[in-house]
Image (spheres, rainbow, N blue to C red):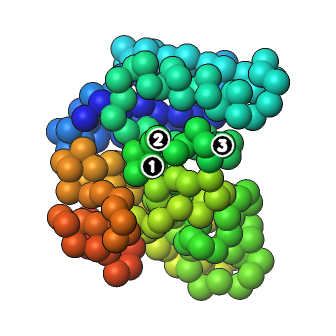
Amino acid sequence: MNLAVLASGRGSNLAALLAARDAGTLPARFVLVGSDHPDAPALQLARDAGIATFALRPKDFPDRPAFDRALFNRIEASGADLLVLAGFMRVIDGAVLGPWAGRVLNIHPSLLPKYRGLHTHRRAIEAGDAEHGASVHFVTAELDGGPLIAQARIAIEPGDDEDALAARLLPWEHRLLPAVVALLAEHRLALTAAGVTLDGTPLKAPLRLTEHGLQ
């Protein structure tokens, strides 16, 4: 499967995907990495790995749909079968997403549908939650609102602040995203009229990442 990735920042989830490919657990070919920030460290990470890169700045376009169309034109031209948003901090126009339904994934640091948007770790702590986590979902025009695929869960410990909680969650994110992408690359996971299916069977609840993998 040809894979494209969009990232706005450091690219730690991109690094996790590349590590899974190199370990032989992610049967995918990385064809393009793009960003909305020309100086994003994720782009240098991709260049170091020999992957084609590009950056487009939203301020160079008249509106969000124009930016999104230019973005997806690049991705389409790359021959990508699947697009992964790995820390891409923008909402994508629904009309642009339409032809890509079921072929765009996002990872979000909360147990969706809780805490869509930003500052998820802080919000979970302030709410007094007992646990926190990360979710991978198919992308729709609704912010962090697409069909859920899988989640990782960790306990919120006494004395946690948002930085400590984020640091403990990150290794789980780095396992969760490659595991889900691998299911898609193996053609085991799909978004259908019946919802998210695994091996042809609709999921009744999101898969859960454990020490032993997705279950």
Determine whether 131 is above or below 8 in the image.
below
Q: Nearer the viewer, mark 2 or mark 3?
A: 2
Spatial CA span between label 2 and label 3 = 12 Å
Label 2 vs 3, first from the N-terminus: 3
Which numbered dot is residue 101?
Answer: 1
Q: Residue at x 34, y 71 (%)?
A: 194
Q: CA distance from mark 1 to mark 3?
A: 12 Å
* Residue drawn at the location 30% of the way across and 57% of the way down: 190
93 vs 148, nearest the viewer: 93
> Marks 1 and 3: CB-CB under 8 Å?
no
Q: Residues within 10 Å of mark 1 (few under 14, many from 20)?
A: some
Residues at marks 1 and 2, CA–CA distance in whole angstroms: 6 Å
Residue 88 numbered tag: none
Residue type highlighted by circle 3: Asp
- Horizontal and vertical percent position of residue 99: 46, 41
The image quadrant that residue 59 belongs to is top right
The residue indicated by pointer 3 is 93
Residue shown at 40% from the left, 51% from the top? 102
The answer to which of 192 and 53 lies nearer the viewer is 192
Q: Is residue 96 toward the left or the right of residue 194 in the image?
A: right
Q: Quadrant of residue 191?
A: bottom left
Q: Position of residue 210 (x, y in %)?
A: 32, 71
Left or right, 108 with reference to 213:
right
The amino acid type found where label 2 is placed reads Pro
Mark sitting on residue 99: 2
| Residue 184 visible in rendering | yes
Expressed as whole percent of the image width and height from the top left, the position of residue 79 reads 35, 23
